[in-house]
Every structure is written in structure tokens, then in C-alpha cells.
Amino acid sequence: MEDLSFVFKNAQFEFSGVKFSVMLHGFINAYSLDPDCVESVCDGDTLTIQCSGLLCRGGQEPVAGHATIVAKKLEKAVTLDIEAIVGNAAEEIRCAKLSIHNAPRGRVINLIDSRPREIPPQGMVLRYPEGWRDVGTPLLILDCEDGLHYYRSHDTRVQEKRFSFVNRQDGSLDTELIFEPAATEMARFITVPTWELGMGDSVEEIYAPHIAHIEKAYNLPVWEEREDVPDWARKISLVASIHCMHWTGYIFNTYDQVLEHLKQLAAMIEPERILAYLPGWEGRYYYQYGDYRPEPLLGGAEGFKRLCDGAKELGIHVMPMFGINYASIHHAGYEAWGKPSKFMGPTSHDGLTYTDFDASRHYDIGYHRNLNPAAPRWQNRLVNQTHALIDQFGFEGAFYDISAVWVNDSSHELYPGTIELVRRIREGHPELLIGGEGWYDGTMVPFPLIQAGHTDGRMNYHDAAYAPILDKYARGFGHLCLGDPSRLSCGVHELGHNPEWRTPLRKGCIPTVTIVDGTMEKALDRVQMIVDDAKEYARLYL
């Protein structure tokens, strides 16, 4: 982790045992609070700090600006509110950093991947929103020698937070709480949502007010009252992830083969319990993203229609997979609907990411671009294609890949745009179930069904950090990188093989089976074990 090579002159404060300072970061300069311009008043349990001047160039040059900090003492915590403005009219404040000095040291215990993390010597940065590994809700809990310490934001919106831990040369630890507002709203002034830092006797005690806060902030209905969960979806206890075509064009299952597998599963468990999830149904996985239609090599429109109709006759519901923010540039009309929709971060960088789909080890896939589902032209294309396919083939679920990805887009605010996309897709289709990949707290508003378990050597299930925060509002199922029971194949997913082939039996994780070519023929006994899990899931939770 990089850091400054000098000490930036800055005012420091102490209140109720907490030593802290504040910095402002623009796109051109970094600003500290001038210690010579500070006035503070303590009134009982409240400390109010007014700073009438800032410093830049590492504290060597005074500049115009103002900051107000209000610190309040609670029973087991301290809250801090920050407002600031810089004098340079051309400067926008990108983020505000609250540094807690001589901070408690411990293991972070409530990250998405559920693995406690020690703070390494080089320090550590954790980000929210980050839908796969880091911070799923802006609450961080540390298990320290003297008990549980926590940091949390009272923000009522999905906006970026960074939690940074910096080991100092004197052996102390600084914890940095960084707030970055929506890039569409950045200005020379900033109002930071309340930061709270404190202690709790248990994880449950710490989470309780935070869960209540996000429920109110996002107007989250509990699972049993969600209007976007059709009645049929409340009976699902088995997700059959049946893979169709790999990026290379390798065929795992044609549409007719998918239907035969569903017939086999329907003989093993009540068909109404099964949700058929279809990665690679549209043809070459990822390569075809952006232009969704049945793949001729898998059976074409007639074959896909047979599959959807046949599943419906069995009582099974079909959920094809779409990409919410990726598209290939080779599709007709890309310049019109794709190019204007590219993700642009706060600095207008397009933020491309890469995946090695063909084992060439280059990670430089030049054919695709990252598109923002809040961008009108891309959103219109997704809505129109989904509606046309539903009308033609009658499937009852739609899954949107990589939906938890976060970019602080300077053109279109991502999160409200995602909510609007899902609202439009469900318009006129009240029985449609919408699923998405990855989890942070706000994703539960548009996506009642969440694909969880993306692996970095071990499956990361999103209910593992603290189950009640997911279980109360949504349901998860196994990621498509889950190994199949026969040869541990991940099908279309770039991981290749995964030794984990069975999901845990928990309320927040619907049992999931991966089916590739040969799975049902070669590992029916293991498939039966997963089906038995599904029956037990139904008995326990449905």
C-alpha cells in the first residue's frame, strides 16, 4: 500500500479518548486543516470544531477554505460529522478522509468472504461497495484484545467508502475512514455522512442498529413481504445451473439436452422446487454479451422454445443469464448504444477489466467493454431485448451477471440506474424473478435473488459474514463457478475447475447443482446428495 513520504502538517484533535484528524482530497490538490485557524467548543458530550483555513503542498502553503467537525459522545461510541469547502473555485473535492490515530489493532471479522483478516505490515485498504470479497455494508468490526471495535457509516445512499489501515513507524496504527460522494455530484464543498466508531459486547449488538438503518434508508421489505418475489419463487429449493456454451464455443449442453436433464431432476424432486439457471444459453459465454438470442448451434429459436415450453409443462421455471454491464464491440450498432454507455470513473477513465477465457494468460480481452446500466442507450437495449425474449419464449426468470460491480461513474450514477433498469424489466411482467451476481447491502433492493460464492480458492457465500443481514431480505444460491459433481468442472466460468461442488445447507443459500456434459451420467449419486439437500432445505425453510 502506497503512502506519503513525509508528514503532512495537519491539525489533530482528541475527544472522548479518540484522536483524529481530517484531510480533503481534490483532483489537483490535497488539503489539511491549518492548526493556526482552529477554534473548538466543548459543550458536555459535544465538541464543535471550526477551521477557517486550509493547507496544501504538504502543509507548506495556506489556502482559503473552511471545515466544521462535530463530535458527539454516545454510550459506547463517538460520532463525527464533517462539512468542508475549498476556496479554489476550480477544485472539486473527490473525497474526505477521517483518520483515527493510535487506533485499536485487531482482526477484521465481518467481510464478505467471511475470512478474518489480520492487518498486514504493509497495511490494507477495504472498499465498499465491493460485492465479492470486501465490505458488503459500511460496517467494519475488529476483534481486538479488549473486545469488539467497529466503524460504520450512517450514509443513506450507496456511495463509496474506503477503510484503510496504515501501520506507522512508531508502531501505532491509523485507521482511515474515507468517504467519496457520487461523481455526478462532486463540488468544491462536501458533506460527509456521519461516521460512528465504538465498541460492542457482541456482533449481534453491533449489527442491530445498522440493519435497522439500512432497512429504513433503502426502504427494504423483508423477504416474506417482497412484491418482486412471485409466489412460485417462494417454493424453490434447488437451483440447477445447467451450462450451455463456453467462450471458446465448446458445447456443454444443447437446449434439448438441458430439457432432458430437467426431466431427470423432475423425477428426483418436486418440479416446482427447481429453478433452471442457464449460463451460456445465448451462445459463446461473454463473447455474445450485448446481443441476446438463442444460439443456432445449441438448437436455435425452435430448440430454445421447446426447452422453455417443456420446462413449463414439467412445472420448472427457467432463468437465462444476461450481462448487465458487459458487451462485445463486434455487435451491430455498438457505436450507437455501447460507446456512449461506457463506464467512466470520477477522472473519466473507462476502467476496463480483463478475464482470461482462453488460457492464453494475457488477460487482455479486446472485444468487450464495460457499460453502465444507468446509461440510457444501454439500459434501453437491455430492457428491449429482455422483453422481446420473454414475450417470445415465456421464461419466468432473468439473471444479470456482475450486477454488484461498482464504479463511481461521472456520467450516470450507477445504483439508481440499476434500480430503474430492474423496474423497467419487470414492468408488465409481475411473475418475473430477477437475480443478480454479488452482494452489497443496496443490491437487495433490485435483486431478491443473489448468486453467491465466487471463489478465490474457497467459495465466498455472502450470508457467511453475518447471515441475518441477507436472510431477512433476500436469498442466495451457488455461484456458477461451483464445481460439477462429476469432474469438478466450472463449465463456462473461467476458474476451470473447483473442488467444491456442494453448497452449504443454510437459509441464505439455496442448494445448487452445476450440470455440464456428463454430469448426470457419471455422478448421479452426488447429484442425488444435492437433491436431498434441496428436500431438507424445503423442510427447514419453506
Image (cartoon, grey):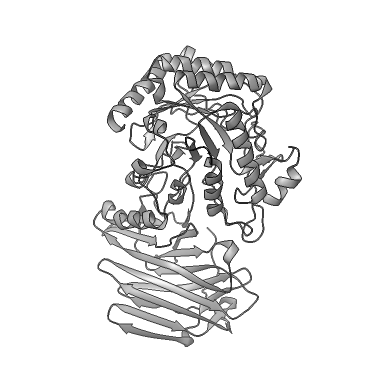
Q: Position of residue 277 (x, y in %)?
A: 50, 28
Tell me the residue at 60%/22% (across/down): 304
Q: From the viewer's side, name the closer residue of 114 and 262.
A: 262
Q: Residue furthest front?
A: 428
- Whether residue 423 is visible, yes or no, is yes
Residue visible at 49% across and 22% down?
312
Number of dots carrying numbers: 0
Q: Nearer the viewer, residue 113 or 131?
A: 131
Question: As drawn, which residue projects farthest toward the top?
Answer: 521
The spot of residue 121 in percent (x, y) is 44, 56
Where is residue 226? Give x, y as percent.
39, 43
> Where does the image place residue 387, in percent across and percent down from the top left?
60, 36
Q: Is residue 70 above or below residue 179?
A: below
The answer to whether residue 487 is seen in the rendering is: no
Compared to 150, does 440 lie above or below? above
Q: Quadrant of residue 233?
A: top left
Q: Quadrant of residue 253?
A: top right
Q: Is residue 488 left or right of residue 92?
A: left
Which quadrant: the C terminus?
A: top left
Q: Residue at x 37, y 20 (%)?
A: 270
Location of residue 373 with respect to 494 vertically, above or below: below
